[in-house]
Image (tube, rainbow, N blue to C red):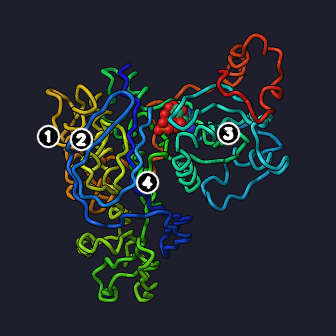
């Protein structure tokens, strides 16, 4: 199996956060509720110019020297190594119906009900409520286990993080960011955070379990180690919808790669791993878009529209044009006047309302991602926004279709130089369609402002001929290219028992999991 080096790089300078709790769009109204918080922001638009001067990378460390006029300082550098399920037993207990206002799409999910039932019965959740069946994998900030909620027959993926380790390795903020982002999400192709609980030693996230492995593993199993075009289109279109939703929620994902795209038991995907994501300020702005005279009123802002807390913009809504065809919700910052006016022009040139939800003005100077997937603007240290996700989407599609990434060098340093300086090439004789190549070329444009998706976000990409056959509204009903084998819980239980050390074989489940100091490494 071809292994990608498991390092992610992270060079963090600042984080702008936003808590957009709920964005609700329907035919007649746009309503946004939530609270914005600016946790720490030392750069919101200050000019910066950097060039890659020297990059030294070895197995365990990354050091980057930037010839830079970026004024932010105090930078931290850290290098990281790197189903929808029917598994719940139908039981009387699950007739307990939970109300989940923050995740309206989970209303009929039995796992919610099971969790609520146990919480209602026992108070808070704890490790003793679960039987850990298997270690699914291990990331930079924790290990993920397949966990069964005792007596309910529901499977979950439980991410367990050692709080001492997080504090010692200064990863508390990463863990907190991931948790905050997970708790915002309610989308079919993104993970559901069912619960979070703490023990004295561990912080545990309870998420949906994906039984189909990840797309990296699945790709290796394909003939020629690449997907057919219809299969690649299927996975890419679901990922695109997930990215679109994330951008709407003010999250720039920044870590797209096949390893982070998990396959649910129904064959649809789930994007995972948010600890490198950037939360940024989203500024929903209603912009007129129709040419009817009644709509010729300037932009509407429905929330103060500035990253800078000192900026006091009026809250204004002009009711005369609150018709569905008359506005487009946009997320724009007052800091990027040029971008804003370009976008407004673009919006006005369209005849149909289009949802565009791009925090393209968000700027981070962090050096994060996986080398082969890093966008040129991240490597150059130019500052980056949501367009990095469209770059990584291009690399992702290339890898699904061709079985390798386009700029891979002999080592990480060469890879980074290739990303910045080498032009895109397709393997001689590769049989991918013109539409696929054209889409990849549009996405892998080195200048983020000229990249497909920069101006109108996912909408622009969805309209590309490569996706012509995709019915976006019914994508969840599309038959996936592959459906994983169902999980055999009794077999897992048996494997779990035989994996116990011999002197533990007589121990009951409750013996093993009741204490707060459960040793997670015994698997
Ligand atoms: N919901 C899930 N269902 C099934 N397997 C999962 C799930 N979440 C994570 N995994 C598995 O657990 C492994 C560890 O995941 P985790 O998100 O902690 O770290 P990672 O993806 O390796 O990256 P990082 O180091 O950046 O956190 C993954 O490789 C994945 O295979």
Of helix, strand and loop, which one carries label 2? helix
Residue drawn at (29%, 33%) of the image = 401
Q: Which mark is residue 436?
A: 2
* Extreme residue in the right direction: 121
Of helix, strand and loop, which one carries label 4? strand
Rounded to the nearest angstrom, the CA distance separating label 3 from label 4 is 24 Å
Q: Mark 3 points at which residue?
A: 202
Q: Residue 278 carries which label?
A: 4
Rounded to the nearest angstrom, the CA distance separating label 3 from label 2 is 45 Å
Nearer the N terminus, badge 3 or badge 2? 3
- Is 150 left, or right, of 37 in this rendering? right
Q: Which of 175 and 215 is in front in this view?
A: 175
Q: Mark 1 points at which residue?
A: 423
Q: Do the residues labelled 2 and 4 touch (CB within 8 Å)?
A: no
Rounded to the nearest angstrom, the CA distance separating label 4 from label 1 is 28 Å
Of the residues tagged 3 and 1, which is closer to the observer? Answer: 3
Q: Nearer the viewer, residue 93 or 121?
A: 121
Nearer the N terminus, badge 3 or badge 1? 3
* Extreme residue in the top direction: 502
């Amino acid at each position: 199996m071809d292994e990608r080096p498991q390092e992610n790089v992270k060079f963090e300078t600042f984080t702008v956060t936003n808590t957009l709790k709920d964005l609700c769009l329907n035919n007649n109204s746009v309503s946004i509720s939530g609270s914005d918080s600016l946790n720490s922001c030392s750069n919101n638009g200050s000019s910066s110019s950097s060039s890659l001067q020297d990059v030294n990378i070895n197995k365990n460390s990354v050091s980057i020297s930037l010839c830079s006029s970026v004024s932010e300082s105090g930078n931290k550098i850290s290098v990281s190594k790197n189903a929808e399920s029917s598994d719940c037993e139908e039981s009387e207990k699950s007739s307990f119906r939970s109300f989940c206002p923050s995740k309206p799409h989970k209303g009929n999910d039995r796992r919610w009900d099971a969790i609520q039932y146990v919480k209602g019965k026992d108070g808070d959740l704890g490790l003793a409520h679960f039987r850990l069946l298997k270690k699914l994998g291990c990331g930079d900030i924790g290990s993920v286990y397949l966990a069964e909620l005792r007596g309910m027959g529901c499977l979950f993926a439980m991410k367990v993080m050692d709080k001492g380790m997080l504090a010692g390795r200064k990863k508390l903020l990463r863990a907190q960011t991931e948790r905050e982002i997970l708790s915002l999400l309610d989308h079919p192709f993104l993970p559901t955070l069912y619960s979070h609980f703490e023990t004295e030693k561990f912080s545990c996230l309870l998420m949906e379990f994906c039984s189909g492995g990840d797309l990296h593993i699945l790709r290796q199993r394909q003939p020629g180690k690449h997907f057919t075009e219809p299969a690649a289109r299927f996975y890419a279109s679901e990922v695109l919808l997930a990215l679109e939703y994330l951008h709407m929620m003010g999250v720039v994902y920044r870590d797209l790669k096949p390893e982070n795209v998990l396959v649910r038991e129904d064959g649809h995907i789930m994007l995972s791993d948010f600890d490198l994501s950037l939360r940024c300020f989203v500024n929903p702005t209603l912009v007129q878009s129709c040419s009817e005279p009644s709509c010729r009123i300037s932009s509407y802002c429905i929330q103060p529209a500035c990253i800078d807390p000192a900026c006091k913009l009026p809250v204004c809504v002009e009711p005369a044009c609150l018709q569905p065809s008359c506005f487009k919700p946009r997320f724009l910052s007052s800091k990027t006047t040029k971008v804003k006016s370009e976008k407004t022009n673009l919006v006005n040139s369209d005849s149909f309302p289009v949802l565009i939800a791009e925090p393209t003005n968000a700027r981070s100077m962090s050096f994060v991602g996986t080398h082969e997937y890093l966008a040129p603007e991240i490597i150059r240290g130019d500052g980056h926004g949501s367009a990095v996700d469209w770059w990584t989407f291009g690399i992702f599609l290339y890898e699904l279709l061709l079985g390798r990434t386009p700029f891979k060098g002999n080592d990480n340093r060469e890879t980074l130089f290739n990303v910045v300086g080498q032009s895109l090439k397709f393997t001689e004789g590769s049989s991918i369609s013109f539409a696929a190549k054209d889409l990849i070329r549009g996405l892998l444009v080195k200048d983020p402002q000229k990249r497909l998706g920069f101006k109108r976000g996912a909408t622009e990409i969805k309209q590309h001929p490569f996706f012509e056959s995709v019915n976006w509204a019914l994508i969840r009903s599309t038959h996936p290219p592959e459906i994983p084998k169902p999980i055999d819980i009794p077999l897992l239980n048996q494997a779990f028992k035989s994996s116990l050390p011999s002197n533990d074989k007589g121990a009951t489940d409750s013996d093993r999991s009741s204490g707060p100091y459960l040793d997670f490494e015994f698997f």
